[in-house]
Image: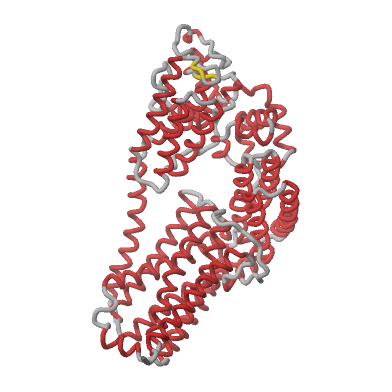
Amino acid sequence: MFSNNQYLVFFLIGISMLLLLPLSMARADNAISVVPQTWQMLDYLAADYAGAVEQGKIIDETEFAEMQEFSATVKTQIVTLPEHADKAALLKQAAQLQTLVENKADTDAVSSQALQLADALLVAYPIPTSPTVVPDLKRGATLYQSHCASCHGVTGGGDGPAAIGLDPPAIAFTDVERADQRSPLSLFQTISQGVEGTSMIGYSEQLNDADRWALAYYTGTFAYINYVANGETLWQQDTSTRAHIGNLDELSRARAEQIGVVLGRKQAHALIAYLRTHPEALEQALTGIALARGRLAASVKAYQAGDGKEAIQLALSAYLDGVEPVEPRLNTVDSALRARIELGMGVFRTGLSKGEAVDTIVKQAAEVDQLLIEAQDLTTNSAANASTIFLGAFTILVREGLEALLIVVALLAFLNKAGRRELLPYVHSGWIAALVAGGGTWAVAHYLIDISGASRELTEGLSALFAALILLAVGLWMHQKSTGDRWQMYLKEKMNSALSKKSAWFLFVLAFISVYREVFETILFYAALWQEGLEIWLLSGIGAAVIVLALITWGMLRTSRRLPISTFFAASSALIAVLAVVLTGKGVSALQEAGWVAVSLAPIPHIDLLGVFPTWQTSLAQLVIIVLLIIGYFYNKRLVAPA
């Protein structure tokens, strides 16, 4: 029997690992302090390269020299960043940008390469890209007159009294062509850090973040001041247009040039004009199913305009940002409809990726939109009540908890059967650490950051596949020990060396991954249900589910003690094999929802409990696992066959 002290040691290990995570992240943040400056240089290069080169010829030697310097410095600074899976790709892109500049390439090619690298840099090394509160434009106007007007002019024309004789000249914020390539984030970074080699100084020490964002938004309005009225009409009446910018972060990174590819130049100017002057209007932005429908329509528009990449991003956002946040509510009223929406949107994204005909894409979008209309009616008209919250909380925990429970109980039963009870703390510490990490996930989801739909699906998918591979190995091993007299041989020859310290930590990892995957999904579902305001019924549902799972645990452990050891191993190996197949299906399905794997319909029923989904990708992945299990089964049989 393991001691309470052992429990405490492993419990503290789990907590320590969780508490050390923010510290390691803080160190990483310090190491990548060069990211804002690198991003700013890329943004500046994209906007100003046109002033240095025209049709392959240098038109401004000084400006061109600066473009060469910036492109070289970008590559040098990326080299200094911490190691990351995407770092090599970033360096390759930086080298391509440098070559384009040196060869005096076309303006569009250089601008596109610089902006793509800037976006990729933020994906690999995230930094804050938006204000924490809605910018105060009145405050921005006051700050502009006191800090900027002397050079840039009262109305932003670059004609202030102090601009006389400046080299390079002060920027004219009224220049529409240049403004189209700048975002509020671009202006914020310039205001914060200044521009080396110019009279533009940085204000990071003189102005706080809120003031610099207010100033950035205000200066970003000069070029579009005549479009504000049209923008208000567009924002109020065209929901598909509204779907292009759904929150403050998207607005802070939005460039009129990018939006204009899909909406057209005039509409892009109108939309940017209205939202930069009235960022508070984003409170009226679409959410939930309405957001999904708007982004689905915007995706179709982008595809029709020939921008396949933007169409795919909008389609992915339609699910991850629109549907996924309301999944818990939708599951309680019609889980089958939720599954059809997931499948339909997956097929739609795959069609976009494959370059299907526009008519086909329009038809698929219309079919998905009908499903979304049904979901919108259900989630709007079906007010949350005590019974739906209770049943939702109960079924979610039982469904998700049962998978993790089966794995953990099988491990505990095995160790009891093997007489290795001193290793039980490794399994217990694994699931305890998973619960602690789950609590951390709740805190992160509520108080620190919003966990995006993509992050959630990737975490679920990759952890499920990892657990499935481990279970495949464990299941085949257990089956081998249940065949003939292999167990007796194992006891005599291997017991002293088996389950070494390394193997014991393997048990810890398996228990942690198996439980945390389910805890992660369950916690995020509960976080959404908590917002309904019926906390007592949510907690009651959780309590009832815990009692049911406890009874199942007791029954399984009691039954396992009575089974002959070979029968126990045979039953356990079969159970674990089934779980490996189930987790494989669920893992691939989650990666499909995150946009990592394509979706191709298959004539297969949808059985969510068993991880069976009507797509060829999930089915083929499960078939591979089944084939490996069959091969392993016959291999084990062959080992004990008489010579």
Residue 539 appears in the picture as rendered: no
For this view, does 99 lie left or right of residue 493? right
Residue 91, position as x, y percentages in the image: 40, 39
Quarter the C terminus occupies: bottom left
Number of callouts in the render?
A: 0
Among the 4 quarters of the image, the one containing residue 302: top right
At 31% from the left edge and 59% from the top edge, which residue is drawn? 16
Relative to 539, residue 67 above or below: above
Residue 618, position as x, y percentages in the image: 57, 65
Quarter the N terminus occupies: bottom left
At 52% from the left edge and 64% from the top edge, which residue is drawn? 587
Furthest toward the front, the residue is 643
Furthest toward the left, the residue is 496
Residue 360, position as x, y percentages in the image: 73, 51
Among the 4 quarters of the image, the one containing residue 9: bottom left
For this view, does 337 lie left or right of residue 94? right
User: What's the coloring here?
Assistant: secondary structure
Which one is in front, 53 or 419? 53
Residue 417, position as x, y percentages in the image: 35, 86
For this view, does 92 lie left or right of residue 602? left
At 42% from the left edge and 91% from the top edge, which residue is drawn? 563
Relative to 329, residue 544 above or below: below
Which one is in front, 155 or 133? 155
Among the 4 quarters of the image, the one containing residue 126: top left
Relative to 350, residue 549 above or below: below
Residue 642 appears in the picture as rendered: yes
